[in-house]
Amino acid sequence: MKKLNTNKVAEVTANELIEKYKEKLTQSDSENMIMTIQLQKQQALIKEVFDKAPEAFPDNYILKEENNGTKNK
């Protein structure tokens, strides 16, 4: 009588694991780069909006400079 080797079904080789790890790492790096670029664009947009309309931002986001160049909240 034949019997299925269930251990073979669940077996993972080192090469399979390495390949899957490389795929995930590459995907993670790509997602990280995309998010970094998006964040840089968002920060630039926020700065541009602030430069044009600082009154649009809540007071707790504004630093006020005194005459001596120090910044206060």
Image (tube, grey):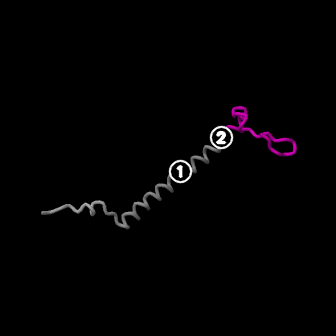
Farthest residue in the right direction?
Answer: 68
User: Which residue is the site of mark 2?
Assistant: 46
- Counting labels gives 2
Magenta highlight range: 47-73
Q: Which residue is mark 1?
A: 34
Asked if 67 appears above or below 55 in the picture, the reply is below
Position above or below: 11 against 36 = below
Expressed as whole percent of the image width and height from the top left, the position of residue 59 reads 73, 34
Q: Answer above or below: position of 69 versus 9.
A: above
Instruction: Kindly state the secondary structure of the residue where label 1 is placed.
Output: helix
Camera-side residue of 68 and 4: 4
Q: In the image as oriented, which residue stretches furthest toward the left?
A: 1
Q: Classify residue 35 as left or right of residue 3.
A: right
- In the image: residue 67, left or right of residue 42: right
Q: Assign a secondary structure to mark 2.
A: helix
Q: Quadrant of residue 51?
A: top right
Q: CA distance from mark 1 to mark 2?
A: 18 Å
